[in-house]
Image (tube, rainbow, N blue to C red):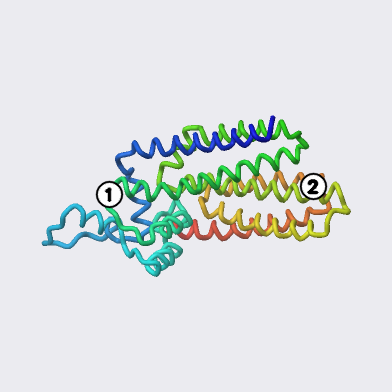
Amino acid sequence: MNIRLFYIGVITTFLISLGLRLYYLEHRVDLHLDEVLSIVLSEYNDYGWGKFYEDGIVLDSNTIKEKLLWNDPTISGAFRDIAKLWKNNRDRPHTNLYYSIFRLWHIGFIDNDTKSLLYRGISLNLVLFAFSFVLAICLVRNLLLLASSNSNTMQVCILVFLMMAFLNPASITNTLFMRPYMLQECLFILFLWANSMLFCLLNNCNINPTSPKDLKPRIVRMSCFLIISTSLLLLSGYFTIAFVTIIFMVCGIYTALCIKRYIYIYIYNNLVFGFKCFNISKVFCRHYSR
């Protein structure tokens, strides 16, 4: 495939994916209850979460909505809310990462119009979608480099993967829903890309022992980045522990069998992962024991 046709295909796929999301966003007229909950929890607002409106005072609908949804629009107010979310996000099945990012995204914003709420909240998901799209290209490229595929096969596989990943209804729905799902989708791809990037570096170093001197520092840096991306993925939802465990087990076995010289890197990553799982389990058990 001609490289120009490949780039045209990638850009066309992105524009169609973005256009579908914008089209369905324009046709949304109401907020789902969980989306309202995202705003209330991220703003750490007491109204709507145990605090009642004052007796004997008549409030119009706009005032009620403003008291229910918004707290302090300032930067300092946002960081105070994030500190409270870190201690207790008031939503036990979910972690506080999405709510913290969502709170930062709404700094300086107070609006009760439904369309404005949708545009502001979903714009964060659109940014995550664009980031996921770029990461997906890099992920498939790394996987096919490890498989020693030729350039034509790589370009076709990248286009097919992009269409399957971002033109399906589930991905579009994730983008159009103000909940943690688009963030989780993005962090899944980031975690897999970091794994594939580390494997590409390890594979290059294993095949060519006289590789450039800067390759080993790059391996160390990518290993550290993998730890960070793993932490972010775990913070996006408790259920990701099972997925990360499977990936690390498979990658660890492959490293032990095929790249024995660098097994210590995966041993270190697994130890860090185990420590984080232990901390998460303690927090999870503490919440549910109340």
Mark earlier in primary sequence (1, 2): 1
At mark 2, the secondary structure is: helix
Q: Position of residue 163 (x, y in %)?
A: 56, 32
Relative to 241, 45 lies left or right: left
Q: Which quarter shows the N terminus?
A: top right
Q: Nearer the viewer, residue 56 or 274?
A: 56
Q: Which residue is disc 2 drawn over?
A: 203
Residue at figure coordinates x 40%, y 54% from the top left: 91
| Tally of marks | 2
Mark 1 falls on what kind of element? loop
Amino acid type, callout 1: Asp
- Residue 176 position (above or below residue 277): above
Front tag of 1 and 2 = 1
Give neighbour class at mark 2: few <14, some 14-19, many 20+ (Cα, 10 Å): some
Q: Which mark is residue 113?
A: 1
User: Measured along the vertical axis of the image, is residue 84 above or below residue 48?
Assistant: below
Dividing the picture into quadrants, the one containing residue 76 is bottom left
Residue occupying image coordinates x 70% and y 49%? 197
Q: What percent of the width, then of the height, locates residue 181? A: 47, 45
Q: Residue at x 30, y 39 (%)?
A: 29
In 3D space, how far apart are the residues under numbered discs 1 and 2 (Cα atoms)?
53 Å
Residue furthest to the right in view is 210
Q: List x then y, in percent, for residue 17.
A: 49, 36
Quadrant of the rendered image containing residue 2 = top right
Rendered-image quadrant of the C terminus: bottom left
